[in-house]
Amino acid sequence: MSHSLYEHAILPSFLRSLPQLGRTWRPLNFSSPTFVRISASRKIEEETIPGYSAFRYYPTRIGEVFKERYQVVGKLGFGASSTVWLARDMNCCRYVTLKIYINSASMGQQLDDELTIYKRMERGSKSHLGHNAVRSLLDSFDVDGPEDKHRCLVHPLLWESVLIFLHCNPIQRLPAPVLAFVLQCLFLALDYLHTECQIIHTDIKADNIMFGITDDLELDGGTIYVSRELKMPKEWGAPVLCDFGSAMVGDTEHLEDIQPNIYRAPEVILEAPWTYSVDIWNVGCMVWDLFEGESLFTGQDPEFQTYRSRAHVAEIISLLGPPPPTLLAQGRQSHKFFSDEGAFCANIPLPERTPLEDRETSLEGHDRVKFLSLIRKMLQWEPGKRSSAKELGEEEWICEHL
């Protein structure tokens, strides 16, 4: 991606984020009777999560002001470990996102993980184009809740995710030009993370890639404490890689079990040492989902009717053929799936061999050849044979569709 492209996508919102010659916003009054009030008997979204405990969540109020600066104006989302809010940065006259974690005691050792990763990211070179392709951190602070402190991260406001954009398409597939643009931005982000910051994301999926917003946000009344949908922006910004709660430093080899089940790389399943290339495998699986409308792997075990590693390994063999002995030799769990001679022996039948060429049905000719070449450079048994993020961002299929 050229500098001019990212300047077009990112610079306008950056300029709007600057303090406007000393101007500040005044707090809004939220006592208007036009707001729709929710019955106390109705469960709010996060209250439906299994194991929900009210004391763990900060009781955020619409209109509440944090640090005499950030005023909450609406809810954007929720999860098991946080709620996400739309807020006005009254010092800089802009809208931001507040991610408010559950209480510190419930977070335990994970409390500082995401903040530590963001601080590490900020040490990377600002001149690298990928610096603008990852979500930045504007501020962080702790707030006192009824039971304990709660960590809050402040981010620039983004629009919807690639996953929601995908669902807007009736055929549930991303058009080639959109996918090419998303991938070029994503590979810039990963090149920045891998080479400049020594960070492995580990959890790349369509709902962790969000589009920027380059025009001013218009607000109106909404239902309190239920996640709101932002209005369609007049101008979209470039896609940004988000959610670093599962990210890890990459200047050492790891053995942890990571990644969404169907995106787990072979070395993760086998418990062989892994590093940056798990992100590349992850992207390869996601790309197939977004463009082909189906997952390459399900891991659905015929005996247990749920995800199992042995079923996932069998599916990878069906796609790529048997794994190389060098990889099996490094895996602490290889013996669960393979004999000493390298034969699959996990007590389930191997699916019929179905290579990529037989699974791709929507493309033809040169376009098909180049797309499959892109996928193959990400989906390799051996981590060392996968292309780097920088190399992938320069692939023909991507460049030809921009």
Image: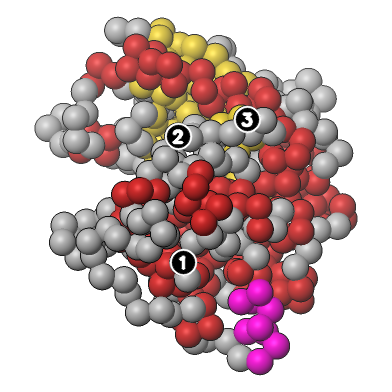
Query: Where on the picture, by quarter, is residue 149?
Result: top left
Screen quadrant of the C terminus: bottom right
Q: Are marks 2 and 1 in contact (CB under 8 Å)?
A: no
Query: Where on the picture, by quarter, is residue 364?
Result: bottom right
Q: In this view, does 206 lie above or below 149?
A: below
- Specify the amino acid type for callout 1: Pro
Q: Residue at x 49, y 61 (%)?
A: 323
The question of residue 87 being in magenta is answered with no
Q: Position of residue 93 (x, y in %)?
A: 67, 29
User: Which residue lies under the disc numbered 2?
Assistant: 256
Q: Which residue is drawn at 51% across and 44% down?
A: 330
- As helix, strand or loop, the secondary structure at mark 1 comes to loop
Q: Where is residue 189 in the image (x, y as percent from the top left)?
A: 69, 46
In space, the residues marked 2 and 1 are separated at their CA atoms by 24 Å
In space, the residues marked 1 and 3 are separated at their CA atoms by 28 Å
In space, the residues marked 2 and 3 are separated at their CA atoms by 12 Å
Magenta stretch in the rendered image: 365-373
Q: Can residue 12 be seen in this view?
A: no
Q: Where is residue 256 in the image (x, y as percent from the top left)?
A: 45, 34
User: Which residue lies under the disc numbered 1?
Assistant: 322
Query: Where on the picture, by quarter, is residue 164?
Result: bottom left
Which of pointers 1 and 3 lies earlier in the amino acid sequence?
A: 3
- As helix, strand or loop, the secondary structure at mark 2 comes to loop
Count the numbered circles shown.
Answer: 3
Which of pointers 2 and 1 lies earlier in the amino acid sequence?
A: 2
214 left or right, relative to 124: left
Q: Which residue is drawn at 66% across and 23% down?
A: 119
Q: Is residue 116 visible?
A: yes
Q: Residue 252, which numbered label?
A: 3
